[in-house]
Amino acid sequence: MNMDNLNLDQRVEKSSGGGQAAMADFQLVSPAELARMLGVPPVTIYSWKRRGKIPYIQLERCIRFDLSEIKDWLEKRKHGLGECESQSLH
């Protein structure tokens, strides 16, 4: 069977001998998807990546973000009222 014709889940299953559990542990999103989720421009995501501020996965020329790692990353950055919130209260 040609791997080019398989979706990502099928590729992981085939290469790991049935490893659906491996895919269940993480969900990858693109920089554009992450930017939409965080409400920032995509250029901000690329800037954070370039400066080593955000965890990412490099798949050859593709950049992807593991949502569980992003959630942990965000949790570590929680504070009281953030700059975005305090500006909207004025």
Image (spheres, rainbow, N blue to C red):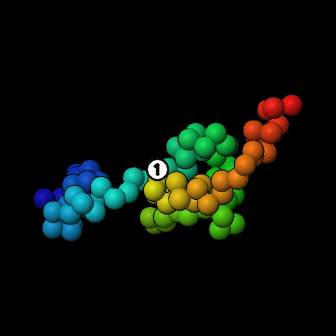
Give the image location of residue 36, x and y in percent: 58, 39
Image quadrant where one finds the N terminus: bottom left
Residue, disc 1: 29
Q: Is residue 14 left or right of residue 64?
A: left
**Is residue 15 something that shows in the picture?**
yes
Classify 71 as above or below 17: above
Picture residue at 55% right of the left edge, 47% below the top = 34
Q: Secondary structure at mark 1?
A: strand
Asked which quadrant contains residue 25, the reply is bottom left
Give the image location of residue 50, x and y in percent: 66, 64
Give the image location of residue 4, x and y in percent: 25, 56
Q: Is residue 90 left or right of residue 46?
A: right
**Is residue 3 something that shows in the picture?**
no
Label 1 Cα neighbours within 10 Å, binned few <14 / some 14-19 / many ≥20: some
Picture residue at 38% right of the left edge, 57% below the top = 26
Picture residue at 61% right of the left edge, 43% below the top = 38
Q: Is residue 25 left or right of residue 4?
A: right
The three-letter amino acid code for the residue at tag 1 is Val
Picture residue at 52% right of the left edge, 43% below the top = 33
